[in-house]
Amino acid sequence: MKTLLAITSLILLAACGSGGPPPPDWKVDSADLIERYKKHALLGENTLSERYFQQAVSATGGAGRIADTARLWLVRCATRRAMLIDDACTEYADLASIEPKAADYAYYQFITLRWDITDTSLLPSHHRDLVRAPIGKKQALLSQVSDPLARLLEASLLIMRQESDATTLTLATETASSQGWRQPLLTYLKLQEKQAEAQGDIAERARLAKRIQLVEKSLTFSP
């Protein structure tokens, strides 16, 4: 299973395929449900996504697992920040203060833009490279990230840090478009539309307006 957090300690189904006993139901359920949350959140199907997320939290919470529940909130926060939603990850931080996990906390610092104090040795290599790259060199690293959600997250973080350029915005837009992720796509298209307006590019603004219209119409029929 591929998760948003490319860190071994963050894979909820670590026991799968290990040859040992099958993982408990709460672990299987929470892993499946958090993937469903991500899928529907990115599609802009908010009612479904919230239902799946609360069910995931109920699965880990029912087992009394503080760190695993915190991790779910961390995945939620990262997914939202990939959509340029300025989530402060408060719920994760509250739980992590009780039962901290170093790799999770480093990821939390990364997605909340505390790069000056992030322990980069605990981050996935592509995130570590982004943090360590000098200003002006970070944007070029995005195209090298193979996982589309990780790429979208990195682009959004650069935008939040005001370290992005037009190429960053285009890459984020087309990453969301290629995956059919309507929620972030709409956000990035609107940013591009504002950029075209500021540049006085009437034709490009009209093209982007049509793309926005198509996405908004699709969202109208979402569950």
Image: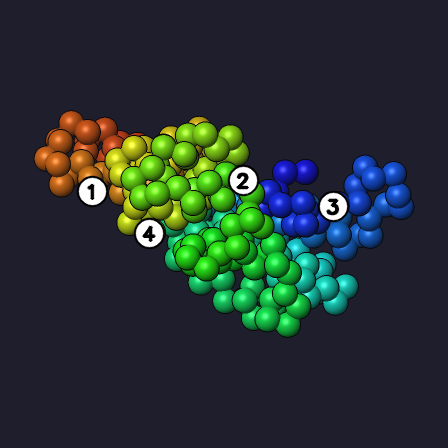
Discs 2, 1 touching: Cβ within 8 Å: no
Q: Mark 2 and mark 3: span between their CA atoms?
A: 22 Å
Residue at x 28%, y 49% (from the top left corner): 162
Q: Which residue is mark 2?
A: 125
Query: Which tag is nearer the camera, tag 2 or tag 3?
Result: 2
Task: Pick whichever of labels 2 and 4 is earlier in the sequence.
Answer: 2
Discs 3, 1 touching: Cβ within 8 Å: no
Residue 184, picture quadrant: top left
Sort mark 2 into few (<14), some (14-19) or many (20+) by Cα contacts within 10 Å.
some
- Residue 11, relative to residue 77: is it above or below? above
Q: In the rendered view, does 140 fall on the left or right side of 58?
A: left
Q: Which residue is mark 1?
A: 194
Q: Which residue is mark 4?
A: 161
Query: Which tag is nearer the camera, tag 2 or tag 1?
Result: 2
What residue type is disc 1 on?
Answer: Lys
Disc 1 is placed on an element classified as helix
Query: Which tag is nearer the camera, tag 1 or tag 4?
Result: 4
Discs 1, 4 touching: Cβ within 8 Å: no
What residue type is disc 2 on?
Answer: Ser
Task: Pick whichever of labels 3 and 4 is earlier in the sequence.
Answer: 3
Task: Pick whichever of labels 2 and 1 is earlier in the sequence.
Answer: 2
Judge whether residue 115 can be spotted in this image.
yes
